[in-house]
Amino acid sequence: MKVAHKKNLALLRPTAEYSAQVMAFKEELLSNTDDFDGCAGLEDCASFEEWIRFEERLRAKYKEGYVPSEVFLAVRETDDRLVGIIDYRHPLTEFLMRFGGNIGYSVRPSERRKGYASEMLRLMLDICRSYGVKRVLLTCDSDNTASRKTILKTGGVLENEIEDTVGLSKCGRIQRYWISTGLDT
């Protein structure tokens, strides 16, 4: 599946063609001491071949808490450069409903502040809409201004802010936003 949009960005299913770029993406996030939101456990993998086995690897890690997800690479079409990774988790478990949400994403540090996160999220909302999904939940640290702006820019409506009792956030507070895909209007 390929979805393209105005920022010359496409969401692509991961393939071996992008193996070196995925691992370079990992190294860039590590060098920047970033979180790996929406990266399907890339931080735990030593190789692309290990990472690409999402279903098997994540099911073994999370056991009964495992939730299937669809992972996409955000690739800039002008130069075929991987700029981000995004995933859509469905259905929401009690844990995801409270803390993690449906969609997670990361943009490589060297490609930030160019509108890619917002475009990735818009493209993912198109995919969710094609599945008949009416709304999705996104969460972010309450002090993560960049994520908050991205979520608000794509139609996010703050439901509440909660204490992070599981240690996912850096600041101890998580904001929960709902975004309509447009199917319920």
Image: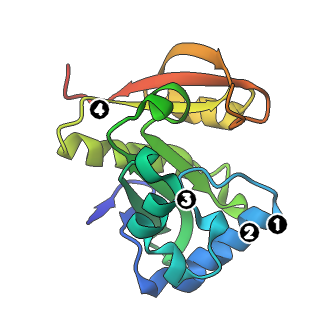
Q: Residue at x 44, y 86 (%)?
A: 17
Mark 1, residue position: 31
Inspect the image, locate mark 2, and give the three-letter code of the amino acid beneath it.
Glu
Q: Residue at x 48, y 77 (%)?
A: 80
Relative image position of residue 64 (x, y in whole percent): 41, 47
Secondary structure type for disc 1 = helix
Q: Nearer the viewer, residue 130 or 89?
A: 89
Inspect the image, locate mark 3, and give the three-letter code of the amino acid beneath it.
Cys
**Tag nearer the camera, 4 or 3:** 3
Q: Nearer the viewer, residue 58 or 123?
A: 58
Q: Nearer the viewer, residue 159 or 98?
A: 98
Q: Earlier in the sequence, mark 4 or mark 3?
A: 3
Q: Residue at x 50, y 52 (%)?
A: 62
Secondary structure type for disc 3 = loop
Mark 2, residue position: 28
Q: Residues within 10 Å of mark 4 (few under 14, many from 20)?
A: many
Mark 3, residue position: 39
Q: Earlier in the sequence, mark 2 or mark 4?
A: 2
Q: Are marks 3 and 1 in contact (CB under 8 Å)?
A: no
Secondary structure type for disc 2 = helix
Q: Residues within 10 Å of mark 2 (few under 14, many from 20)?
A: some
Mark 4, residue position: 181
Determine the CA span between mark 1 and mark 2: 5 Å
**Residue 53 can be seen, yes or no:** yes
Relative image position of residue 7 (x, y in whole percent): 45, 56
Secondary structure type for disc 4 = loop
Q: Are marks 4 and 3 in contact (CB under 8 Å)?
A: no
Q: Earlier in the sequence, mark 3 or mark 1?
A: 1
**Tag nearer the camera, 4 or 1:** 1
Position of the C terminus, as image quadrant, is top left
